Amino acid sequence: METRVKNESVTPKPAVILLSGGLDSATAAAIARHDGVELYALSVDYGQRHRFELEAAARVAKHLGVKRHETVRLDLARFGASALTADIEVPKGRSVAEMAGGIPVTYVPARNTVLLSLALAYAETVGAADIFIGVNAIDYSGYPDCRPEYIEAFERLANLATKAGVEGTLKFKIHTPLIKMTKADIVRRGTELGVDFSLTHSCYDPDAVGRPCGRCDACLLRRKGFAEAGLADPLPYPNDEPLGGTP
Ligand SMILES: [Zn+2]
């Protein structure tokens, strides 16, 4: 990858990583670190229904030894309209076919554009041309802002929209190392790179102490990924929740 720094005496290039606290962004961060960049992590407190993923993001940032971790508060719950930010029921027990059938209620309007815009502002500030985001278009194609054509469009925007882009001091690149990986591939790659997945949080609807429900789309895809990778998910799921959703 072009961001790799071959000579260790060279000062590593800064890169911004969007860190949600989930397993995808933790793995994307580990891949970026493996490429030799210095990580500037960004998490966004956008009014999520629970605090556990932001706590996970802080744990993951520490675990990965990031240079700096910023959490920006931006209250998208003011708009509502998503099961992640409003009082809308999170779907449970869906099959993968059902998940792939349309844009789910857990879609947060324009979220990745909001997140990438903040990452771009952070990147321009710290002089980072490289922005990493753990989007994935394979296992869960329902989100329009996880597709390669969207990422390419945002990259063009980044270079048109900034002083550093227009003056040519930075050529922004949006890195999506997971975009073509299955969840099992992500689990395997993260494990190879030493990611401690017990620090991550994926569930859309955890219990009062942050334990995952085991049955929302995020839990089911995560559990399926670990199962297909032949690895144990370190998170504590309720014992009576079968994997695989409703038939
Ligand atoms: Zn869940």
Image: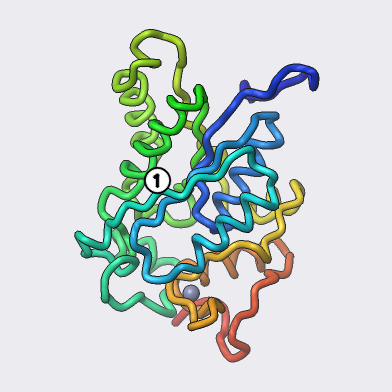
Q: Residue furthest top?
A: 167
Measured as percent of width and height from the top left, residue 211 is found at 56, 78
Q: Which residue is mark 1?
A: 146
Residue at screen point 49% across, 83% down: 208
Amino acid type indicated by mark 1: Cys
Q: Position of residue 186 (x, y in %)?
A: 62, 51
Q: Is residue 166 left or right of residue 18?
A: left
Q: Position of residue 47 (x, y in %)?
A: 34, 62
Any part of residue 37 in sight:
yes
Q: Is residue 137 left or right of residue 154?
A: right
**Would residue 179 be seen by someone viewing this image from the given angle?**
no
Residue 178's place in the image compared with 153, above or below, is below
User: Could you tell me which residue is drawn at 35 percent across and 34 percent down?
Assistant: 149
**Residue lying at 46% horizontally and 15% vertically, measured from the top left:** 170
Q: Which residue is more in the foreground, 216 or 77? A: 77
In the image: residue 235, left or right of residue 230:
left
